Image (cartoon, rainbow, N blue to C red):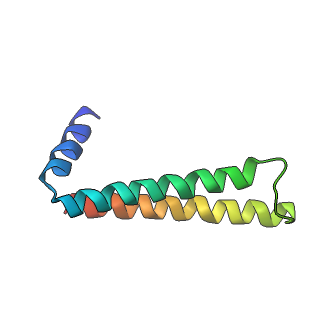
């Protein structure tokens, strides 16, 4: 785990300013989609009128999309 973090920091420092900015934005949107999906699934008083099954499905789609974005960030970072 320590080696992976060191490699991540080294590759982050080698990136251009634009590359670092895009990496940070990518991580930010990964976290936004993940938190939004979990929020939709577990919030009791959801402000939008939606059936419970559709809420769960929509939340799961957002969480899966967040992990898809995370995998893309990891793959782009390895280059």
Q: Viewer-proximal residue, 45 or 5?
A: 45
Residue lying farthest left?
Answer: 14
Q: Residue at x 83, y 47 (%)?
A: 44
Rendered-image quadrant of the N terminus: top left
Number of numbered discs on residues = 0
Q: Residue at x 64, y 56 (%)?
A: 37
| Quarter location, residue 18 | bottom left
Q: Viewer-proximal residue, 22 or 10?
A: 22
Q: Residue at x 79, y 67 (%)?
A: 54
| Quarter location, residue 4 | top left
Q: Left or right? Give the position of 6 relative to 64.
A: left
Residue 43 in percent (x, y) is at 77, 48
Q: Is residue 44 above or below residue 36?
A: above
Residue lying farthest top?
Answer: 2
Residue 7 in percent (x, y) is at 19, 44
Q: Left or right? Give the position of 30 relative to 57.
A: left
Residue 64 in percent (x, y) is at 56, 62
Q: Is residue 15 above or below residue 65?
A: above
Q: Left or right? Give the position of 47 relative to 68.
A: right
Rendered-image quadrant of the C terminus: bottom left
Q: Viewer-proximal residue, 21 or 71?
A: 21
Residue 30 in percent (x, y) is at 47, 57
Q: Residue at x 85, y 66 (%)?
A: 50
């Amino acid at each position: 785990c320590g080696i992976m973090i060191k490699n991540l920091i080294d590759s982050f420092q080698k990136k251009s300013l634009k590359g670092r900015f895009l990496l940070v934005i990518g991580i930010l949107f990964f976290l936004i989609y993940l938190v939004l999906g979990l929020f939709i699934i577990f919030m009791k008083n959801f402000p939008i009128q939606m059936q419970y099954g559709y809420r769960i499905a929509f939340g799961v789609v957002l969480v899966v999309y967040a992990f898809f974005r995370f995998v893309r960030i990891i793959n782009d970072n390895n280059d």
